[in-house]
Image: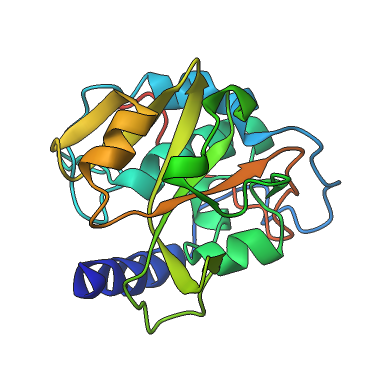
Amino acid sequence: MATLFLSLVIFSQADAAVPARSPRGDGANRPSSTRSVGAGLEAALALLGSPYTWGGRLRGREGLDCMGVVLAAAEQASGCGWRSYPVKPTELVAQRLWGAPGEGLAPVATDALDVTRLERGDVLLLVGPSLNPAEPPIGRLGDVDVWVWHVGLSLGEGRALFGDHHAGATVEEMLVPYLQRYRSEYLGLFVLRGPATRPSRCRTHAPLGGRR
């Protein structure tokens, strides 16, 4: 699992570094956004049923991965294309590009999670103890360092949206049963909630949201 995620980070970072075509420039001087990633949730929901592809960004006939689903919402909310965002979770958190850590939810163990505290559009970073040598841990649960191994979006009422490697598609799941089903991988969540910060380098290019 660690090897898979590290490979995804390397693949996606290299992909994000490809210059995007934009007649309007990179938008470096545009004002910061005060919208949440959840403001673009409909763009992510339009991806339900899309096939899962490791590192996929809906180009050609490929599908997309878990990061791609959240990026679809982020780019719709901010107006900045998905290439504007880093894929390392610690960088996203440090720059508050997907919002601020939720109070008491950053991180929170599955057994201590009260889903009524989650809001529609919250970004869900699923954390586990497996070491990711590409970045530092996102936090600690008890005496255990944890890293982000999966991402999704809260749909409210205990539901979540994932570009899911387990299901092989973008799916809607009941969050707690999902976490319990894969408790060998995920110990809990690190929750991000808006407002988000607009990327300083705002690239404009064809969006991935809503394309099959």
In this rendering, position of residue 107 left or right of residue 152: right
4 to the left or right of 139: left
Disc tally is 0
Q: How is the image coloured?
A: rainbow
Residue 130 in view = yes
Say if 202 sits above or below 132 in the image: above
Q: Measured from the top left, where is residue 184 in percent x and y? A: 23, 56
Residue at left offset 49%, top offset 67%: 88
> Image point 73% across, 45% down: which residue?
103
Against 73, residue 140 (above or below) is below
When the figure is inspected, residue 208 is found, relative to residue 3, above or below; the finding is: above
Residue located farthest toward the bottom when viewing the structure as drawn: 133
Q: Residue at x 22, y 28 (%)?
A: 50
Residue 47 as seen in the image, left or right of residue 96: left
Image-quadrant location for residue 158: top left
In the image, what residue occupies the spot 21% across and 75% down? 3
Residue lying furthest top: 157
**Which of these two is toward me, 91 or 110?**
110
Quadrant of the snapshot with the C terminus: top left
Judge by depth and name the residue closer to the eye, 205 or 130.
130
Does residue 58 appear in this view? Answer: no
Q: Position of residue 27 (x, y in %)?
A: 73, 52
Q: Could you say which is closer to the camera, residue 163 or residue 60?
A: 163
Residue 67 in the image: above or below residue 159: below
Of 154 and 16, the residue lying toward us: 154
Which of the image's four quarters has the N terminus? bottom left
Q: Can you give x and y, in whole percent of width and height, for residue 61 in the image? A: 14, 39
